[in-house]
Image (cartoon, rainbow, N blue to C red):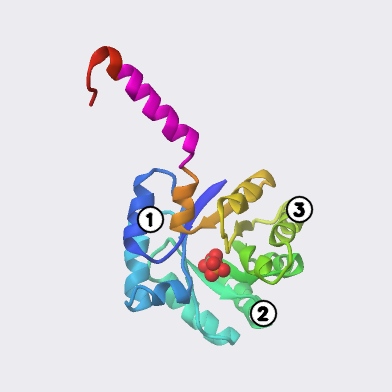
Amino acid sequence: MKIFIDTANLDMIKEINSWGILDGVTTNPSLVAKENTDTPTHVKEIAKILGDRPVSAEVMALDADGMIAEGKKLAAIAPNVNVKLPMCIESLKATKALSSEGIAVNMTLIFDPLQALMAAKAGARFVSPFIGRLDDIGTHGVDMLSETVQIIHQYGFDTEIIAASIRHPTHVLDAAEMGCDIATIPYDILKKMVAHPKTEEGIAKFKADYEKVNGPGQ
Ligand code: E4P
């Protein structure tokens, strides 16, 4: 499974990039707003760090022509920038137009497998089902993701599914178990995915045993 980070924070992106596990970045207007810079400049910085790995940047227009115009501007920032569109009829039209010009679209705010199917049909390169926000309203987000994976994979669309709105490591585990293509994960959850108390305990014991015979190690 590919691992993306869900943030616009440059320090977090650089840190996770240094781990050697990062396959891409997703941003959204709320995440970029936290960084207090203008979107194009910021997206350019992120795209530079990522090299040829994908970075999603979201349009604000809500009509197809506006989405296409804004999407082209975002895609022109760097070759690895893809255009995030919020799921609706207008964005289906814009997806068709942008993808037929070779511009990759990430259809976001997906809460139903049929929305993902429609986005894939229109040519979306990525679809982003939001798990956590469904959990927030008492619906099993993971079930929706699982149905989406089953449908999109069984028809062999050239569309990758990004498990989004991830709230805890178990969401990532569920996504990996069901064969979801990508998970976009917040920084604090990526850190939790590395830590385990038994690992810490094991490291401390090995160190103590080594030092009993060899004296203080490095
Ligand atoms: C995905 O691309 C979105 O940026 C993100 O996963 C939204 O998650 P949230 O529900 O935590 O805001």
Of the image marks 3 and 2, the number of the one nearer the N terminus: 2
Q: Is residue 4 left or right of residue 208?
A: right
- Is 197 drawn above or below residue 73 in the view shown? above
Residue at screen point 44% across, 49% down: 191
Q: Which residue is mark 3?
A: 150
Of the image marks 2 and 1, the number of the one nearer the N terminus: 1
Tell me which amino acid carries mark 1.
Answer: Leu
Does residue 179 appear in this view? yes
Mark 3 surroundings within 10 Å by alpha-carbon count, few (fewer than 14), some (14 through 19), many (20 or more): some
Quick one: 211 or 67, which is closer to the camera?
Answer: 211
Quick one: 31 or 92, which is closer to the camera?
Answer: 31
x%, y% of residue 5?
46, 57
Q: Which residues are magenta?
A: 195-210
Rendered image: mark on residue 88? 2
Tell me which amino acid carries mark 2.
Answer: Cys
- Is 76 drawn above or below residue 126 in the view shown? below
Asked whether residue 201 is drawn in magenta, I would say yes
Does residue 102 appear in this view? no
Judge: label 1 CB < 8 Å from ligand 1.
no
Q: Are marks 3 and 1 in contact (CB under 8 Å)?
A: no
Label 3 and label 1: CA atoms lie apart by 30 Å
Q: Are marks 3 and 2 in contact (CB under 8 Å)?
A: no
Quadrant of res 94: bottom right
Of the image marks 3 and 1, the number of the one nearer the N terminus: 1
x%, y% of residue 1?
57, 46
